[in-house]
Amino acid sequence: MDWFEDAKLGIFIHWGIYSVDGISESWSFFNNYINHDNYINQLNGFTAKDYKPKEWAKLIKEAGAKYTVITTKHHDGISMWNTKADKAITTLQDAAAKQDVITPFVKAIQEEGLHTGLYYSLPDWSHPYYDVFTRNRKRYELKGEPTRWDNYVKYYQKQLTELSEQYKPELLWFDGDWEHSAEEWKAKETLNLLRKYNPNIIINSRLNHHGDYDTPEQGIPVTRPDAKFWELCYTMNDSWGYQPFDKKYKSPNMIIRTLVDCISMGGNLLLDIGPKADGTIPEEQLNILKQLGRWTHKHAAAIYGTRAGIPFANYGGKSALSKDGKTLYLYVYEQKPELQLKGLVNHSAIKSISVVGDASAKVSVKTENETVRVDLTKVNFDQDVTVIALNFAEALRWTAPQETEVTLKSVLDNKLTDRALGQIASTLHAGKNIFDNSGLTVDGLDTKLPSSKATNPTVLKWIKDHAEALYEIGKGLPEGHYEGLSALSKDRQTLYLFVEGKPTGPIALKGVKNGVARIRVVGDGSMINHEVFNKLYWSSIPGIIYIQAPAERLDKNMTVIAVLLDAPIQLYREKVGAIENNL
């Protein structure tokens, strides 16, 4: 698993006859949205006339991917290579393209030095030997026709033999195993077959518990998965294959931060593209790949070969460690003056600090009361995510930080406004409200806080302006749901997000089951927009709430965003495994 764990980024390719009409791959006929005959007629429009596999391979490499996984056969049973298996439908024999499209692509990616991954659907809903046809119709029952089923197993194992012999894949990405048991699939026998050709073959989790790594689909895990190795498979819009009317594309910034999210939890991102029937890639997808490539090439040191980072309690953001544990990478989503690190046992071992990809940047670090402070005031921030590297003389060690006592007086008297407001957010997030019985009122009017000549007037004004988010407020979100500090109203129905500096992209919330009633800027009153991505109608896993914070309404010291929910907050923190149905 060494190369896989180091790779961090792969490109998934869903290409098949479903791109002709731009409809859901396989599921559109399985669910009776279109009948099977009309679905299969798309073979006549699958031309691949502008297919340029060498350009695909270069594009994938330039995006920063280290491996790629292409669909050799989806559930619809259309084989994209020249298979000799019994009764197979192929793009060479049966489609307008009259091409084996897999062979030139695998040759091209191997010439580019990319690792070879092949997607293969265990089910084949078009094959006469397979028992399932559509959601409402089966061809036969296994117990009634065991020989017919045995013939199907021989069919799919012959195809896997062909793929192994012809392409020597390093990774096999199975799908569809939910339709039968491991015994019925003869999964162990299949695994032995693949290992005969490549003892180091990597198998994903969709061979009925015979795989090497987990494959959460669409839903970014809130917390690090239990599996040592895992990979998020993820679309750019809401579709795997090409669908012309699906314009709900995530921005390059969202995709880059999704990659960072995976890296910080020790996983990989397998980002999907869906080419058109002629072999061209949609412009929106090309743009995302190019912007992704800009960021990955600049920050390669903080991506490949890294391991999961340190806990949120030690650094209130995303982080990763080098393989030897001696370099800590801090991913910064906002333009802000300072970063804080707590609980670093051997902070005295810091040798150097730098901005990844910017040798001219000036950044400094100092330690105050066991808190490591990184000065970013002279940093030219990246347009998407800035990365700070701290190099240690030895492997980094950390422990749960011992929080220093924060009092209302110490906050009010702090001449450094940014730090004072950071202390307010931090104490509220932890569940300690220094404003209880302090004289603060819910609207900030008639507030009688214990001020003196030493009081910082900017801090006092900020408190009064943001009183709603401070008055009778409780503990914030647990780690993983938001990349910053937060707090909850007494009725747990309003979530307050503390936003430092100027975000480079939308603010993201993961794992919130509730619907959102409205979102606004505290103390300003402005209603702001949000959009939910990756909420699958057939899955209980919440989508990601992306909140657009307008730059002109950001507080120059610290912004607070109020998210009013439709009920007291409910969080999704369950284990995210493979999502293996699409009914």
Image (cartoon, rainbow, N blue to C red):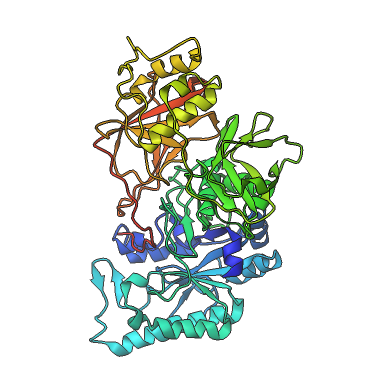
Query: Foreground: 313 or 565?
Result: 313
Counting from the top left corner in percent of width and height, residue 445 is at 33, 11
Residue 518, placed above or below residue 135: above
The answer to whether 326 appears left or right of 546 in the picture is: right
Q: Nearer the viewer, residue 162 or 61?
A: 61
Point out the image quarter for the C terminus.
Answer: bottom left
| Horizontal arrangement in the rendering, residue 162 relative to residue 290 (left or right) | left
Residue 413 visible to an observer of this rendering: yes
Using the image, determine if residue 204 lies above or below residue 308: below
Figure quadrant of residue 305? bottom right
Q: Quadrant of the N terminus?
A: bottom right
Residue 84 in view, yes or no: no
Residue 437 position in % (x across, y down)? 30, 21
Residue 270 pos. (x, y %): 52, 58
Q: In this view, does 95 lie to the left or right of 54?
A: left
How many dots with numbers?
0
Q: Place residue 579 in its image quadrant.
A: bottom left
Viewer-closest of 170 and 43: 170
x%, y% of residue 2? 60, 69
Q: In this view, does 204 lie to the left or right of 176?
A: right
In this picture, is 289 found above or below 568? below
Seen as rendered, the residue at the extreme right is: 360
Of all residues shown, which one is farthest toward the bottom? 147
